[in-house]
Amino acid sequence: MRLWLAGIVVSALAFSAAMTAQSSKPQPSQSPSPNSAGSSSSKDKKHDKVALDPEIDSGAVVNGVYRNRALGLTCKIPAGWVLRTEEMNAREEEDDSGADGVAPHPREQKSSSPQRPQRSTESKVLLAAFSRPPGAQGEDVNASILIAAEPVQTYPGLTEAVQYLGVLTEVAKQQGFTEDAGPYEIAIGTKALVREDFHKDVGTRVMRQSTLAMLAKEYAVSITLIGGTEDEVDELLDGVEFSGASK
């Protein structure tokens, strides 16, 4: 069963790079899914759900604004953009039924770093929005906003957001992105996150990506913004706000 996070990010990059560059296929994980038949009892599954209290809901888009009350998060979606949240969640569920493959070589990590996760039924894409639909012709990079959440318990040893950002960085590098600098802290409203910026040459264009990570309500949450320029990415980030999360 392949790494769920890699599948989500690669899917986003594939959509964003449509008509711009050919994305690489995601690498599978060699570990079987903990939710495979016979791998755990119904009692264990029930306990897992209790451990995820309170669960993050999927949120909703109203009048061009995504809102998630559990996270205290709002995100403005530019006018005319296409929502693909349901399609990406369905795509990952279908891909999870595929055959096992060879896992990528893991980079050296400290003992405190989280291990590679396995797909969890509680993992989800909260928002996937793109400047144009897949297959649509365009001269510029297909800009995108991707927000996803995974239970912290799927990463043994994960205690800090910067550790989760390390996993996201590994996925970005696998897709040909180069780090602009090391991770740094950023405050958005009432929330402190860690951020890292990347770039990737796609023909005569440059794809810019900024990824932010945080831990909230027993979940590891990522916000990935993709655009053709740094200003475009920063403008998307300006539409992200945090206020007090609901209890």
Image (cartoon, rainbow, N blue to C red):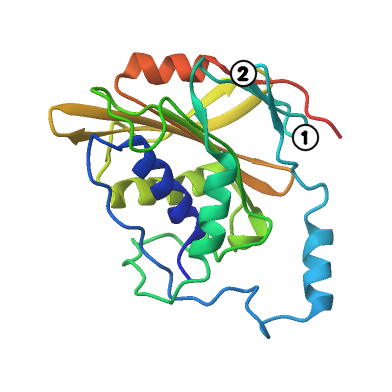
Residue 7 locus on image (x, y percent): 44, 55
Mark 2 or 1, closer to the camera:
2
Please tell me which residue lies in front, 228 or 88.
88
> Of helix, strand and loop, which one carries label 1?
loop
Q: Which picture quadrant has residue 190?
A: top right
Left or right of 58, for residue 34:
left
Q: Residue furthest left?
A: 204
Q: Residue furthest front?
A: 136
Instruction: Say which amino acid is labelled 1.
Output: Ala
Please tell me which residue lies in front, 2 or 79.
79
Residue 177 locus on image (x, y percent): 27, 41
Residue visible at 55% across and 66% down? 118
Residue 133 locus on image (x, y percent): 41, 32
Q: Quadrant of the C terminus?
A: top right
Say whether residue 115 is visible. no
Residue visible at 30% across and 38% down? 18
> Of helix, strand and loop, which one carries label 2?
loop
Mark drawn on residue 193: none
Say which residue label 1 marks. 70
Residue visible at 31% across and 67% down? 105
Classify 241 as above or below 48.
above
Q: Which picture quadrant has residue 216?
A: top right
Mark drawn on residue 64: 2
Say whether residue 39 is visible. yes
Left or right of 84, for residue 216:
right
Left or right of 72, for residue 179:
left
Instruction: Say which amino acid is labelled 2.
Output: Gly
Q: Earlier in the sequence, mark 2 or mark 1?
A: 2
The crowd level at tag 1 (other Cα within 10 Å; few <14, some 14-19, many 20+) is some
